[in-house]
Amino acid sequence: MNVDVESLGSFSRTARSGAERAAENLTGLTGIETAVDVTEVSLASPDDLDGDEKRVGVAIDFEGGIDGTTLLTFSADGVETILDTLVPDVGTEEGAVEEVGNVVTGGFIGGWADHLETIIDISPPEYVEGTSAELLDDAEFDRDRAFVFRSRVSAVGEELDVQFHMFPDADSMQEMLAGGDEQIPIEKLATLRRMAETGARTASETVSAMTGIDTGVDITQLSFVPVEDVPAELRDQKYVGVVLQFEGALGGYVLILFDEASASEVVGALVSDTEVGATFDGEQRSAMEEIGNVMTSSFIDGWANVLDATIDISPPQFVHDMGRAVAQSVVARLGQRQAFAFLFDATLRADDREFDCEIYALPDESELHAALAELDPDATAERTTRAGSL
């Protein structure tokens, strides 16, 4: 399958429009004011969509101008909010969830039908419950070659975590994403995803060696999002970390971000006999800059090895702010040159203590296209495997 980047951007906008219509339908049905937090297109991998969180929702198939499957799911708290609103009228939990799922999914698919100027039929909703991993397995999509459209909807003043996954089948995606001037073989995008996985593992090994905290890579993902939506990818909490720019064969930005508790753990491991304060001043700030610099170097060196090119990084810029504010400063610079961004993100965690580190990489789109044009998936697969084994 070949992917035209311009078409991918167009359908990302369509997914956003569909998600907004779905949120409007949810508001009209429940009276709860909702909003779309983020809509993204991800190249699915075998593990980046998994999770142990228990969720409840509906699965609905669709066919017509585009074929595939959707999953609309609620967290446990979100289901309680829906039940409080609808059960008096509907009667059962399963009935309430099915009614909401049918109306909301209809709005989302309706947005696609309008864009494609066609008719798309949907099946009756099937009530589902289980962990995220179990529900996604039941969807039976091709994880190694699939694009997933994902939207997250939240409510003002209510516990309402709604996630919508749309899995178009491969033939539908091939038809939609072919024919433009900037076509990229999906194998090259899969190589980019493996680059991110390799870089994240190397960064994880680096932080473990420097701090003695045994960490592992919990999530890696490659998404395609409108630049203005990048800040919404970060949780609404304070982070401590660094932002670095990279340039050479590939340019862009890397964000290494720890939640405050994890930052205290890391700095405490690096700066002996020093009480870590809330402001992360002096030695503490220097320690964070040092570990962010080394982790970024490890992450980017993996990319340079895969691309067989030189990539340099700037001195680290220390940040201690809300995640969306940190991302907004980067987006302001990227947004001057591009409307969409390929976003690499990885989460590192430790099993035995408080530790959560998020890595985000935002390459310059035009330079990424140039790098992809030179990329040989077969040759880089060998270099990726070799880099991952070092």
Image: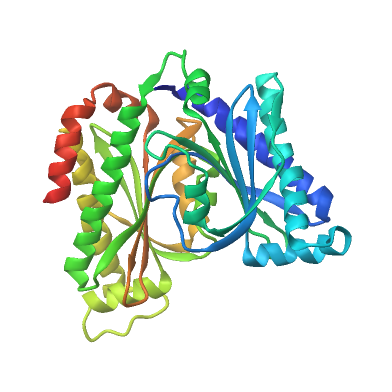
Report the side of 371 relative to 344 (left or right).
left
Residue 284 versus residue 304 in the image, above or below = below
Residue 193 position, x and y percent, is: 32, 40
Closer to the camera, 2 or 46? 46
Q: Which residue occupies 52% across, 28% down?
A: 9
Quarter-of-image position of residue 293: bottom left
Residue 42 position, x and y percent, is: 46, 39
Q: Is residue 135 visible?
A: yes
Report the side of 118 relative to 264 (left or right).
right
Q: Can residue 251 be seen in this view?
A: no
Residue 377 versus residue 314 in the image, above or below = above
Closer to the camera, 128 or 12? 128
Numbered disc total? 0
Q: Which residue occupies 72% across, 41% down?
A: 124
Closer to the camera, 294 or 194? 194
Residue 1 position, x and y percent, is: 39, 22
Q: Which residue occupies 18% across, 45% down?
A: 301
Report the side of 364 relative to 237 (left or right).
left
Report the side of 183 relative to 313 (left or right).
right
Q: Which residue occupies 24% across, 63% down?
A: 291
Quarter-of-image position of residue 349: bottom left
Q: How are the colours assigned in the image? A: rainbow
Residue 109 position, x and y percent, is: 68, 34
